[in-house]
Image (cartoon, grey):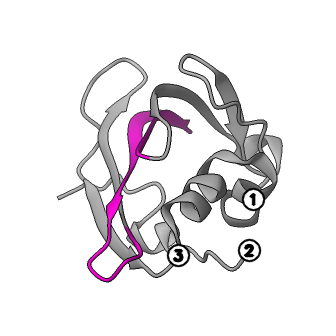
Amino acid sequence: MRDIDLCFELEDSADKVWRALTTPALLARWLGPNDFVARVGARFTVGGAANDNVDCEVLALEAGRLLRLGWREGEFDSVVTFALEPGLEGGVRLRLTHDGFVTHGGLPAPLVMDPIGTGGWRMSWAA
């Protein structure tokens, strides 16, 4: 299974988590330098050195609830989705899905394709 599907139960408020996902300076603490713009169709880059950059596009945005990004890394395209909903004990549940791995030509990515690895999506909301 190449798709990554993670669910985080966070004690933080939905507002705090949303800000961490959509404020460039806060997003940089987790994903790295970026020029994110919270607007459907906006294109931006995440990453450090030029050869490690991820080219992204905002595919869907529902304030406080859903952020879906086109994610182009190396030779592969995929989709990253962050979905927020009320948590079990007053916080927020964040579901992170990374799927749709294909080559730039639209062919399925090789079975061994895991550009980030599940561990790469672990996060901290310390700010």
Q: Locate the C terminus and report the quarter of the image it occupies.
A: bottom right
Answer few, some or many: residues within 10 Å of disc 1's Cα (few below 14, many 20 plus, some between 14 and 19). some
On screen, 32 above or below 43? below
On screen, 85 above or below 126? above
Q: Which residue is mark 2?
A: 127
Asked whether the beta carbons under mark 3 and mark 2 sit within 8 Å of each other, the answer is: no
Instruction: Between residue 114 and residue 87, name the one nearer to us.
Output: 87
**Which residue: 70% across, 30% down?**
37
Image coordinates for residue 71, horizontal then vertical, percent: 50, 36
Dot placed on the residue nearer the N-terminal end, 2 or 1: 1
> In the rendered structure, which segment of residues is drawn in magenta?
65-92
Image coordinates for residue 30, horizontal then vertical, percent: 67, 65
Asked whether the beta carbons under mark 2 and mark 1 sit within 8 Å of each other, the answer is: yes
**Which residue: 78% across, 36% down?**
35
Is 119 displayed left or right of 57 in the figure?
A: left
Gap in angstroms between the C-alphas marked 1 and 3: 15 Å
In the picture, the disc for residue 26 is 1
Report which quarter residue 109 is drawn in. Answer: top left
**Residue type, mark 3 in image:** Asp
**Residue type, mark 1 in image:** Leu
Q: Main secondary structure of the magenta part?
A: strand
Query: Which of the two marks, 3 or 2, is nearer to us in this view?
Result: 3
Q: Locate the N terminus and report the quarter of the image it occupies.
A: bottom left
Secondary structure beneath dot 3 equals loop
Secondary structure beneath dot 2 equals loop
Instruction: Between residue 44 and residue 119, name the one nearer to us.
Output: 44
Q: How many marks?
A: 3
Secondary structure beneath dot 1 equals helix
Q: Which residue is mark 3?
A: 12
Image coordinates for residue 38, horizontal then vertical, percent: 64, 31
